[in-house]
Image: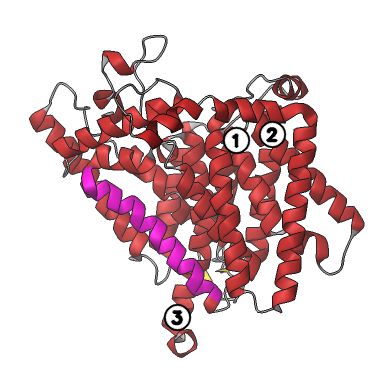
Amino acid sequence: MKSLSVKGTSGEAIVSPPGWLFLLLSLLAVLYSVLPLTFWRLPNAVEILFAVFGLYVFFRYARGIRWSLPVKLFAAAIVIATLSWAGMVLDHPDLARSGPSLEDVLDKFMFLFLACVLAGNHNRIQAYLITFGLFVLVMPWLSGNGFSEIANGLDGVRAEFGINPIRSGLLFGAVALGLICFGYRLVLRPGLSIVRLIVWLLLLLFALTMLFITQSRTAMVALVPGLLIAFLLLMAFSRVARRTKLYIAGGAVAALVLSVLLSLALGLSNLIEDRFGQEAELVSQVIEGDLDEIPKSSWGLRLLFISEAFEGISERPLTGWGYRAGEIVLDTPELRQGDGGVFSQVHNSYLEAALRYGIGGLIVVLGLFAWAVVGILRCWRHRQMPLDMMIFLGATFSYFMVANLFDGLLFQTEGVLMFNVLMGVAASYIFQDMQLSAREPERHI
């Protein structure tokens, strides 16, 4: 079979595998992205096949990007994980695993293979994001208990939808952010459509309501900087008149406020107030500098975890404590769960990365985020990325990076999935831009 030239929006081919192989990789990419949002979850066989075929396609057929920064960070992460395991074998053989936990590294780089499938093609990327967003919106029925769970959530019972409520809320918050960032495209292009406006408002209302009934304070707090970054990017980079920018931003804010008010009208205001009110005492203590008697509430435990994490990192700053670092450091009688179990992580991805793999692990995580953010801005400047896509990615990365301060998302299935979806979309544009820059450097100065 002939090779299939997988071209981006500019017409530049990112990879050129045989047609059957690209179709297989595309199918695996879709299954990898949506199965974690369903009752069936993600079978190990699908993830392994996606990784195997993805590695083959990337290193066999990708042109000019095989040794890009994320690939170098991937190689560095493997070395770091191996050194971390070797250090534990030498110093704490009773706590070391039988081998280095390379799967804990590989799952952060699945976006390389998603990027090969998306190939910087805006129509393909748009279809992918719409598909992923729709699966999130129907997640209450695909992995939860449907209308009954929603009804219970409106009555004050915390909704999970078959997943941890923090990460369920994070997914719905991301969809709400996407609807806002793409609102102009969805409602006003090519002209104003009342039908599309009503559908858009209903979807935004539903996404926000689902976020509220998961009672995820992490997602609610992270949504604020995400929206702020979206506004700042619009004002800074849009080439339309200032008045038009304000009209667009004002319309988005009005829609957001209306959706929030309608959600609160369903009886969620007291629920949200109670959720944040539970931590009022802790906030007062922190402001007053009284850290001697930290209550073991959700936020109180996070403060205690931070203290334990810094202590653990200071003991092994170079190689870390390996795959089970959180369990090792938090295995104290004072920090056990209500049922006596040990918390598996410190609820902060950045500290967790340093705790598991030392400072090198943290550098890899921050390096990936920095590469994506800088690359997104460069793609927009080179006109390889639409403005609303740049705003969406900038806002959603901000949202996700803030959320990682409050939960170890990069070490949980749904958090890793969201990371790879965002990175995959960003990397597909960035890789295409890198190839064009190498071929026509004078156009990308």
Q: Which mark is residue 43?
A: none
Residue at 39%, 29% in the rendered image: 285
Is the residue marked by circle 1 packed among few (<14), some (14-19), or many (20+) residues within 10 Å?
Answer: many
Quarter of the image where one finds residue 341: top left
**Relative horizontal placement of residue 67, taking residue 246 as reference (left or right):** left
Residue at 36%, 31% in the rendered image: 303
The answer, for residue 432, to whether it is visible in the render is: no
Residue 273 lies, with reference to residue 352, above or below; the image says above
Distance, label 2 to label 3, CA atoms, is 43 Å
Residue at 69%, 76% in the rendered image: 242
Q: Nearer the viewer, residue 103 or 52?
A: 103
Q: Which residue is mark 1?
A: 169
Mark 1 / mark 3, whichever is N-terminal: 1
Quarter of the image where one finds residue 275: top right
- Judge depth for marks 1 and 3 and give the one in front: 1
Distance, label 1 to label 3, CA atoms, is 39 Å
168 part of magenta stretch: no
Residue at 62%, 43% in the rendered image: 173
